[in-house]
Amino acid sequence: MFSKAIISLVLAASALANIFTTAPVASTTFTGGQQATITWQDDGLTPSLTSFGPALVGIYVGNANQQTLLQTITASVDVSTTSSIVFTPDGTIGPDGSDYFIRFQSLSLKDATNAQYPAEAFSAKFTLTNMTGTFNSTIQAEINGQSTAPIGATASSSATGVTSAKLTSATTSHATSASSSAKATSTSSTGAAGKVGVAGVACFIGTAASLLGAALF
């Protein structure tokens, strides 16, 4: 089952910040097979959204050290010129639950602490309902092995079944490159010790007040 993403090309108010995910947040529930919206904005920290640039965006599960890509929402979206994505969660990627999160992986910027890995940013964990899939033992072990530390490492994942996405422009928007959406169930592990920095942790926690606070993991 393939998902289709509609990327709303909204001009960001400022390019001097990293990704702060405003939806989904911890209280968000998305429904498998129904349209959902991911939104983000500047968080006032570095690196800049312009530096972060084009990013792969997907639904993941896992812990601070191991993460699995379940669905590629878009293979490339410029986070400095776009602030929202409308997509349809694939109901077959897993069961009902609150272990899901969005990960942004820069296609150009490297991790500030380890240039071997890409820069990343995270949403809070959110809930998916109307789901018909299951997690295999490897993925479930990742979830069960959640760390109390924030997600701070890079996971390399693969995606299959890529389909083309439709782009629509808003009144205050300008065009960016086309993107793709896909589903994947590939386990990924990491060797990176750190993340993009406070900004990556803040996006994962999902609230501005938690930018320097404790993580959900």
Image: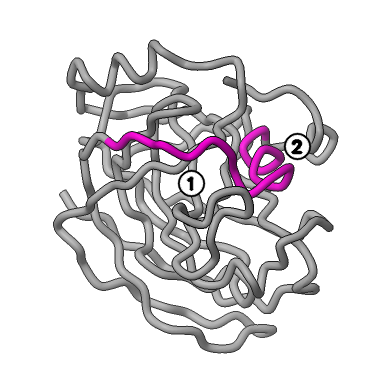
Which residue is at a point 62% across and 77% down the rendered structure image? 81
Quadrant the C terminus occupies: top right
User: Quadrant of residue 150 in the image?
Assistant: top right
Asked whether disc 1 touches disc 2, contact meaning CB atoms under 8 Å apart, the reply is no
Q: Is residue 138 above or below residue 178?
A: above
Tag 1's secondary structure? strand
Q: Nearer the viewer, residue 123 or 115?
A: 115
On residue 79, the disc is none
Q: Nearer the viewer, residue 54 or 102?
A: 54
Residue 210 percent across, percent down from the top left: 79, 32
Q: Give the magenta range.
A: 188-205
Callout 2: few (<14), some (14-19), or many (20+) C-alpha neighbours within 10 Å? some
* Amino acid type, mark 1: Arg
Q: Nearer the viewer, residue 190 or 171?
A: 190
Residue 194 percent across, percent down from the top left: 58, 39
On residue 207, the disc is 2
Which residue is at a point 14% across and 58% down the rendered structure image? 161
- Protein image colouring: one colour
The Cα–Cα distance between marks 1 and 2, rounded to whole angstroms, is 15 Å
Q: Earlier in the sequence, mark 1 or mark 2?
A: 1
User: Quadrant of residue 189 in the image?
Assistant: top left
* Amino acid type, mark 2: Thr
Q: Is residue 153 above or below residue 135?
A: below
User: Quadrant of residue 45 in the image?
Assistant: bottom right
Query: Which is closer to the viewer, label 1 or label 2?
Result: 1
Residue 100 percent across, percent down from the top left: 44, 31
Q: Which residue is mark 1?
A: 103
* In the image: residue 45, left or right of residue 188: right
